[in-house]
Image (cartoon, coloured by chain):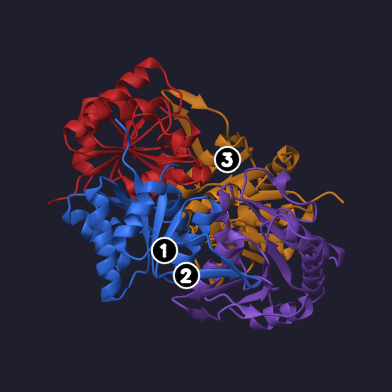
Chain colours: A blue, B red, C purple, D orange
Amino acid sequence: MPKKKLIGVIGSGTCSEAEAKTAEEVGRRLARQGAILVCGGLGGVMEAACRGASSEGGVAIGILPGEDRQSANPYVQIPIVTGLGYARNVVVVKSAQAIIAISGSYGTLSEIAYALQNDIPVIGLNTWSLSKNGQVDQSIIPARSAAEAVDMALSLATG
Amino acid sequence: MPKKKLIGVIGSGTCSEAEAKTAEEVGRRLARQGAILVCGGLGGVMEAACRGASSEGGVAIGILPGEDRQSANPYVQIPIVTGLGYARNVVVVKSAQAIIAISGSYGTLSEIAYALQNDIPVIGLNTWSLSKNGQVDQSIIPARSAAEAVDMALSLATG
Amino acid sequence: MPKKKLIGVIGSGTCSEAEAKTAEEVGRRLARQGAILVCGGLGGVMEAACRGASSEGGVAIGILPGEDRQSANPYVQIPIVTGLGYARNVVVVKSAQAIIAISGSYGTLSEIAYALQNDIPVIGLNTWSLSKNGQVDQSIIPARSAAEAVDMALSLATG
Amino acid sequence: MPKKKLIGVIGSGTCSEAEAKTAEEVGRRLARQGAILVCGGLGGVMEAACRGASSEGGVAIGILPGEDRQSANPYVQIPIVTGLGYARNVVVVKSAQAIIAISGSYGTLSEIAYALQNDIPVIGLNTWSLSKNGQVDQSIIPARSAAEAVDMALSLATG
């Protein structure tokens, strides 16, 4: 029996309604296609994605920064308690076979950077753009919708 | 819907046949009682416990020290890739609501110490004994069988 | 006696001659002004900065990703061995009161992101530029020379 | 110029006067013999050892669990800020070429276990005793005095 794919969803712990709607749809579509959602387990984009996965009977894993499993949002089925603070971002990224970044702040940027350093595909929905010395870095693959992001992530999640 | 309990099973990456048999029975009984097994994801006691859980349709999570999900034993359903080396022991322990220690070497001892530091119950099957300045420390709760260890772990896993 | 300031220098493990020259001058100037250099302890920009600090009798700390203190470049006086892989980037950043980023790749980007998330000042020398949703993020403070970068870092290192 | 030896001193964050006296003497003797002291940077045994090192002009490094360099005891010259919680114990241990354990609780036990797992010599002063399945484990080398512990640690710190 082939293992299920683990797809990471990253974004801020507080987010706009539009971002939450996108994240929820990402979570729903991942669950419908049989993927396991892995995220940081807290609020905002993470909670919306977990709610989406949960609404379709999917599995949502939350890799928590703190010491307390109660800090997970209510839609996390499997809380992984690290106590590592934001060094846990590394674990979120490495556990995923592809990453969907939804908007996000500096924590999300650190996760994008870790993913690119580890050759883990990053699909972006209105997220960071990078350039170095005036040269644009095009490693983040832009998606136009939750549906497109999920399709791309699943097809690239081969590692 | 109440969340499933996460029970940690710790022990060496290589083990005797008797230890493997015990670990497998622990895994089977945890799965039958609806608990999720969390372990370090490698061989020996970890693999035997995952094999037991898997044989009963249970979920086994492997918190891996390395960078490669392929390093998980074949019975791990959900590989968590940390890249943290043996600092990942902390994550195994904190993610569990109770720990069953089966024999084990110094890595297992570090996990027992972390669990006791965090007030996570530790059930021991032929594992370490501790004393300090001539005083025996009785924090590790001894069990006489896999069945007893699983019953104790589930009843103590309230945190 | 006031404690010495800890300044982080981040950049790639392999670098151009021009980048090495800049890093070495940064290291020299930090040492001359009595600051302690903290970096990832490996080659490239890290080694050049340590060489500069060492040539002026300064202290260079290397926070190593691996398990072996021998992996430090020869100018590291104090090797901190983490075994955490690239999660050690978090430790480099948090230990510094200000960061000087010299060019760099995705590992450096993850460190910049962690620093900005933690309100640690980041001075950039030909390094990453960030924007989100078409809006330029100006949190990285650009410097035009090693001398200017060191002066900025020392004056901002108040945390 | 040969690098200075890094010797770890581990023990509880609160301790008796007798333990503090021992730790302070360990710190003084390490400094006099030119070794760098590495510890967890907090109070109790750690603070006493740092005070001893400081009183002899030695260098004391504190590997802090939290996010704040101000949490270091006042005798730490070089605070390493990890934000990793007690996973930082791994970094204390791996950075040291030998460990002196003074009494201590479960956190100290986790550090002893990590050191033994990594073949780092552990000298014990009234600390834990270990046995497994009725067999005593004699890996912790007992010392009868601070002087003897320091001499043993320095002669064994060859890795």
Residue type of the residue flagged with mark 2: Trp
The residue labelled by disc 2 is: A128
Q: What element does badge 3 sit on?
A: helix
* Residue B28 horizontal/vertical position (percent): 23, 27
The residue labelled by disc 3 is: D115
Q: What element does badge 1 sit on?
A: strand
On screen, residue B109 above or below B146: below
Mark 2, residues whose alpha carbon is within 10 Å: few (<14), some, or many (≥20)?
many
Do the CB atoms of the residues marked 2 and 1 lie less than 8 Å apart? yes
Closest to the camera, between mark 3 and mark 2, is: 2
Residue type of the residue flagged with mark 1: Gly
Residue D8 numbered tag: none
Do the CB atoms of the residues marked 3 and 2 lie less than 8 Å apart? no
Q: CA distance from mark 2 to mark 1?
A: 8 Å
The residue depicted at 43 percent of the width and 27 percent of the height is B43
The chain to which mark 1 is attached is A
